[in-house]
Image (cartoon, rainbow, N blue to C red):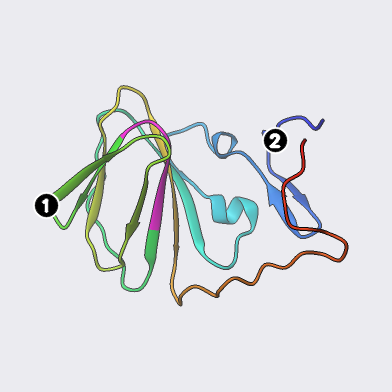
Amino acid sequence: MSDEVKETVEGNGYAVGNVDSMSDEPGFRKVRRELGVTAFGVNAIELPAGLETSGHFHDEQEELYFVHRGRIEMTFNEGDAHVLGPGGLARVDASTVRKIKNVGDEPAVYLIAGGKGGYVGRDGRLPEGETRGVTPG
């Protein structure tokens, strides 16, 4: 069995890494740059307990937020507020103003993926000789 990935490793057609090794400071973790993502924007943010971001919106980019660790409150359009814990998700239209507050006692880490242009459809295919399904590890 392989060791758990701690630092970014690039291979032939892929890169793997760990968000916690991308920075040891609060703030942005440049996932897109670190892993070489080119098809969409993606960052992780560590937000210390009790801190709140300023509101922001985008001209074109829809975003998906995923809470990795901690508890955040997302407020939309200066009104609706929702608390998300580990595994929580939020999709936000480009023009929707959003701000985030860490409402937990520990730093929160959340991942944001953004893009425009729409879903490309289900284009996954199996390599020759593979069959669909899950095999025991």
Q: Is the residue 23 above or below the residue 42 in the image? A: above
Q: Is residue 99 above or below residue 136?
A: below
Q: On screen, 136 above or below 128? A: above
Q: Which residues are magenta?
A: 64-71
Per the image, the residue denoted by label 1 is 79
Residue 119 percent location from the top left of the image? 49, 73
Instruction: Name the residue that disc number 2 marks.
Output: 5
In the rendered structure, the answer to whether residue 101 lies left or right of residue 107 reads left
Q: Residue furthest top?
A: 105
Q: Name the image quarter holding the N terminus.
A: top right
The residue drawn where x is 48% and y is 51% is: 43
Q: CA distance from mark 2 to mark 1?
A: 40 Å
Residue 49 located within the stretch drawn in magenta: no
Q: Quadrant of the C terminus?
A: top right
Is 68 magenta? The answer is yes
Amino acid carrying mark 1 in the image: Gly
Disc 2 crowd, CA 10 A, few/some/many (<14, 14-19, 20+): few
Taking the image as shown, residue 10 lies to the left or right of residue 83, namely: right
- Mark 1 crowdedness (10 Å alpha carbons): few <14, some 14-19, many ≥20: few
Name the residue rendered at 60%, 60% in the picture.
Answer: 37
Identify the image quadrant of residue 116: bottom left
Report the amino acid beneath label 2. Answer: Val
